[in-house]
Amino acid sequence: MKTVLVVDDSTVMLMSLRQTLEMAGFRVETAGDGQAALKRIQSGVKPDLILTDINMPIMNGLEFIKNVRLILRFTPILALTTESQAAKRDEAKRLGATGWLVKPVGGADLIKVIKQVLPGA
Amino acid sequence: MKSASTERPRPVRATLAAIVAFTFGAIGGLLIGLRPGWHPQHTYSLALLTGVLTLASAALYHAIMARALLRASFPDADCPGPPSQNSNKSGLGPPPAFFLSRLQQYLAVFNRHCGTVIETTEQAATDLVSALEQIKNLTDRLRSNVSHSPLRAGQFRQESDAHIQTHLESTKRIDPLLGKISEIARQTNLIAINAAIEAARAGKAGLGFGVVADEVRRLAAKTREAAEDVEGELRRVAANASALQGKLAALVSYLDDVSEQIVSAAAKVEEAVLDVLGKVQFQDIVRQQLEKVQKGLDLIAEEMGTLAGGNQASSPAPACVSARSNLDNLYHEYTTHRQRAVHDEVFGRENREDSRPKVELF
């Protein structure tokens, strides 16, 4: 069973994404901001895919992507955000994100994209 | 529209207005005093008096109108009246501190309302996700139960088929026995007939034997009838068993269909749950938009605080610069395209549509 680490400061988003991903057969780990997510990875959580928000307190998504790439070089990272600024999207790409999804994204569409970047899921 | 720098200062305007009022009053007094027989000193005194009275009336009218306007705007406020310094176009002066303070209170209330909306939608969305989770769990259970039913139905069908088959074979095994019984009855009947013939030949001595032969014939006939009855019943039982087998097969097939329909309905429910789970993301979008509205309200309150502090009295420029800078900051902090579009629309700017797809893999 593949593990997805979901990073978002919204409780509703965390609940909604957990259920969506579990329905598709994934194991789900969650964190409320970039720093908390980074700690989880450092403490041994090895996600097969990371789904992260961009605008978050403490450590935002871009900073998180930058830091996580130092530890997990090849794990796919998808940004799921309300953010529509092209500059931030380009920055995420430069930092090593795998894709960019603007909220809201339907559950079925999200699963489709995840399966696209995570073969065998 | 005049800019602040080209407008006359309030004291200059007030002085000019006073001079005009006095002049009009004095001219009126002069016109009245220029009558034949009036001493010129009386005429000048009258002109001075009417000039002063006109000036006083104009000042009183200005004060009454200003107070009435403030009371109309804030009926429950104990308005101290407009300050005399810092003129603006209305002639009332800049908003007094209590006015700004009241507006700040309103802003604080709106800010709290935004917070309440965020909390309410968050709670509703959380409840919705929990309800969806329950629906999903129920669907899982239903599907799990139903997924075993075709197997159970198959087993039931096999077992019942086996029972019925055994039953039918048993009836078939009875058939030859019935044939034997019928054959024995036929032969017994023949023997009884022969015995009756022999009894008749024996004459008187065979009378008793003839009676026995008749009884044997009746018994043989009854045995044959009983065998035929049993054979008929066995055929009906076999027919019923076959009919039962057919009905059970139809029932199992129906159960299979129902199971398939339930599994298909469960898949559709799951699809709908997934769809609604995606739609719940609206709360996060609304939350972020309302947080920006809250921030905007805070900025307005902050700027009003600056105005109330009287920093603008010497120069209005810092407050204007601060407002513009705050607006720019707010614009850069927007997260959604819609927020920027609304902002640009209000300020009459062209919005640059983000043409990139909502989902993009790099």
Image (spheres, rainbow, N blue to C red):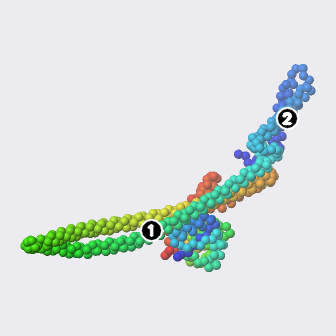
Spot occupied by residue B252 in the image (x, y as percentages of width and height): 37, 67
Q: Residues within 10 Å of mark 2 (few under 14, many from 20)?
A: some
Quadrant of the image occupied by residue B76: top right
2 and 1 marks on the same chain: yes
| Residue at 33% across, 74% down | B162
Q: Chain of mark 1?
A: B
Q: Which residue occupies the foreground of this view, A85 or A30?
A: A30
- Residue B94 percent coordinates (x, y): 78, 47
Residue B56 image label: 2
- Packing grade of label 1 (10 A; few <14, some 14-19, many >=20) is many
Q: Amino acid at mark 1?
A: Val
State whether residue B131 is above or below residue A98: above
For the residues labelled 2 and 1, the Cα–Cα distance comes to 97 Å
Q: Which residue is at the front of the view, A54 or B312?
A: A54
Judged left or right of residue A111, residue B314 is right
| Residue B204 image position (x, y, % from top left) | 9, 71
Q: Hey, which quadrant is residue B127 in on the image?
A: bottom right
Instruction: Label 1, secondary structure: give it.
Output: helix
